[in-house]
Image (spheres, rainbow, N blue to C red):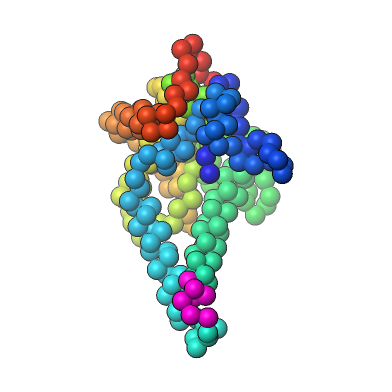
Amino acid sequence: MSHWYDKEGNPCYEVEGKNGMRPSTLRDARKHGWVPSVSTIWNDVVARPMLTKWIQSELMGALWTETHSAENLGAGGGFPEFEKLARDRFNKKQQDVMGRGTIIHDQLEKYYSNVDVPVAYQQLCETVDLKLKEVCSSEGGAWVSEKAFAHHSGYGGKVDLHNDEWVVDFKTKEFPDQPNVKKMVYDDYGTQLAAYAQGLGSGRRLLNVFIDVGSPRVLVWEHEDVNRFQTMFNHALSLWKLVKKYNPEWHDRRVM
């Protein structure tokens, strides 16, 4: 689903439809002059082979499970029924993964907004905070959670966490026994952060926090990575405008 922001940085994810609220579309954005989110741009024009590989792997796992599940051995219905059961299992797995990520993001937003967090998530939030203090020290002052912005070049976004020195994005990700975090991440993650930093005002350092069942892992992107990611995103933005035949940039520089 595409996400959009007005030029003041306000989220415009839904509009009033004939049957109630519905997701906003490119047509709505053209009408109102809204800008696309960072993820909308990237997902629309950039191939993501590692994500495709993961989806294929999960789908094959669902097919294998359905093939060997007791309730389906010897069951009738043929291939259409089998395919539906496998797709349903695969979709449920995806929804479970996304649901867990949304819950964790919501709890971290509460924590950094000084809102009470349920006991079940208190330790997780405190562990993440300790890790950030360890890496970032006191650089940049107080943290700001879930800041939305719009950038004059024609895009917007909502930043998980930032201050005057850092831009932070949280990811829920299962890691195997891999000591080198950088080998387990995608360029997408750094590109998203670089776009956020540009949107807020460049100069901040980029940091991903990966939340697994174990201790959170942190990746601070190097300066050469940041420059590369920013160039990659700006090229993707230019391509998106050409593909969609829509250029929502404006000339008076306003960084929200």
**In terms of depth relative to the viewer, which is nearer, 230 or 111?**
230
Q: Quadrant of residue 135?
A: top left
Tally of marks: 0
Magenta region includes residue 78:
yes
Residue range of the region highlighted in magenta in the rendering: 77-83
Q: Quadrant of residue 244?
A: top left
Residue at image position (55%, 29%) is: 29
**Relative vertical location of residue 98 with respect to residue 168 in this rendering, above or below:** below
Secondary structure character of the magenta stretch overall: helix
Residue at image position (35%, 31%) is: 239
**Relative vertical location of residue 112 with respect to residue 78 in this rendering, above or below:** above
Judged from this view, the residue extending furthest toward the top is: 252
* Image spot of residue 104 (x, y percent): 57, 48
Q: Relative to residue 238, is residue 99 drawn left or right?
A: right
Magenta region includes residue 190:
no
**Relative vertical location of residue 179 with respect to residue 167 in this rendering, above or below:** below
Residue at image position (42%, 40%) is: 44
**In terms of depth relative to the viewer, which is nearer, 253 or 160?**
253
* Image spot of residue 140 (x, y percent): 48, 24
Question: Visible in this render: residue 251?
Answer: yes
Q: Relative to residue 134, is residue 145 drawn left or right?
A: right
Question: Visible in this render: residue 140?
Answer: no
Residue at image position (38%, 64%) is: 57
Quarter of the image with the C terminus in it: top right
* Image spot of residue 98 (x, y percent): 54, 53
Q: Relative to residue 116, is residue 138 drawn left or right?
A: left
* Image spot of residue 33 (x, y percent): 55, 23
**In terms of depth relative to the viewer, which is nearer, 242 or 37?**
242
Judged from this view, the residue extending furthest toward the bottom is: 74
